[in-house]
Amino acid sequence: MALRFALGCRQLRCSEISRNYARYAGSTRRRIERDNTGEPNGILRELAINLVRQVVVPPDADQVMEAFEDAAKALHRRGVTGIHDIRLMEDRDGAKAFQIFQKLDQENRLDLRCWVTLPGEQLDNIVGLGLRTGLGNDRLRVGHVKYFSDGGMGARTAWMIDPYLDAECGMPLMDMDVLAREINKADQAGLSVMVHAVGDRANHELVNIFQDLESNRIRSGWSAPTIPHRIEHVQMIRPEDADRLRNLYVALCVTPANMVLDMNLIDSAVGEKGKWTYLFRQLMDTGKPVMFSSDCPVCDPDPLLGIYAAVKRQRVDGTPKGGWYPEQKITVSEALKAYTSVPAAVHNAHALGTIAVDKKADLVVLSRNILQISPSRLPEVHVDMTLFDGRIVHRQF
């Protein structure tokens, strides 16, 4: 995964990114690439893209509504009935998207169960308003407070313990002491956080923070949020740090479909240390809840693609032979639960995640029984029907 963006000269001018800006923008300077004359060359890394977003004209309400309806149909075709939306991280269109969600919910037209992620930079306001993770109804809820501890491996901004084969160690996207204070403040207020962590140094530091949080909570006597904190991606983590997760109040959200895109990238970035990436087997063996997601739009949000990636650790063409670091393979049943019953349990959505009397009828009918066929045939499976709350929202026949 890489957070890297390419701009032309006009976009640079409109965003007022110049030689002087790149030189004097403090920490942002590290995320604006320059040529050998000192001029910005159009490549922005990580949060530097916010300089561009500030001048982009946001979509109007009708455009947001149309986009939601198109996206909902696309997700239903893939058997998806629930999402975690991070658009509130974007100052320009996040609030508008949240308003559209509320309008659709009030009109009983919200055909997805949506957890809306909140931006960490607004924590004081969120706490001041008395918001809590999980507030809402069974279709629209306040989600986690989102932070970024580092960047992406493709852009060489994921924060590593050892240098990349072709670059330095990447970088944190915020001071770890500041992040620790923010997480402690959120925890005391009943707010759960999700923290993006890709590199092994980022994950190491984050485990330290959550260990200290456990001690602070016990010593001071405050109660933990009702929803566990989340580490997002856990892409590269040393085995000893993975073991330390066992006693922490956290859930792990990983993106198996990303692995298929990242295999060659990781091999070229860290070589044999790639054995510490996408540790599906080891993370599940910690006993911590492991949830799967797509990181859409980075990857296609089709859970069947993610299940295949986690089980086979191969591309759909069967490469690499035997799987990429095959010792980290998991079973189809484990991967299926990581998309269904595990996230439901983590988020106290007890009426979801499994098929049982009195539960919500969010159901998917597949063309084949994926628990009975060879995992190699998973790419042949498609969604015949999707039901949301007992109502058919997609059918292929």
Image (cartoon, rainbow, N blue to C red):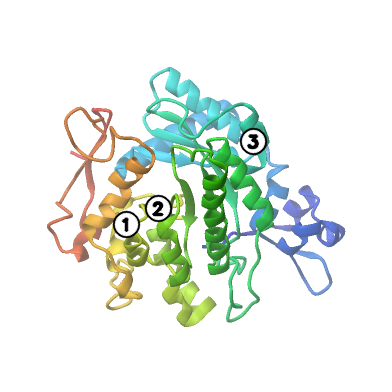
Please identify, in this view, whether the residue under mark 3 or under mark 1 is nearer the observer. Answer: 1
Q: Is residue 9 left or right of residue 253?
A: right
The amino acid type, in three-letter code, at marker 1 is: Leu
Q: CA distance from mark 3 to mark 1?
A: 32 Å
From this viewpoint, is residue 200 visible?
Answer: yes
Q: Secondary structure at mark 3?
A: loop
Q: CA distance from mark 1 to mark 2?
A: 8 Å
How packed mark 2 is, by other alpha carbons closer than 10 Å (few <14, some 14-19, many 20 or more), is: some
The amino acid type, in three-letter code, at marker 3 is: Pro
The amino acid type, in three-letter code, at marker 2 is: Asp
From this viewpoint, is residue 319 visible?
Answer: no
Q: Are marks 1 and 2 in contact (CB under 8 Å)?
A: yes
How packed mark 3 is, by other alpha carbons closer than 10 Å (few <14, some 14-19, many 20 or more), is: some
Q: Is residue 338 placed above or below 33 in the rendered structure?
A: above
Quadrant in which the C terminus appears: top left
At 36% from the left edge and 29% from the top edge, which residue is drawn? 111
Q: CA distance from mark 3 to mark 2?
A: 24 Å
The numbered dot on residue 58 is 3
The numbered dot on residue 300 is 2
How packed mark 1 is, by other alpha carbons closer than 10 Å (few <14, some 14-19, many 20 or more), is: many
Q: Secondary structure at mark 1?
A: helix
Tell which of 119 and 387 is nearer to you.
119
Displayed quadrant of residue 124: top right
At 33% from the left edge and 42% from the top edge, which residue is drawn? 345
Residue beneath disc 1:
305
Earlier along the polypeptide chain: callout 1 or callout 2? 2
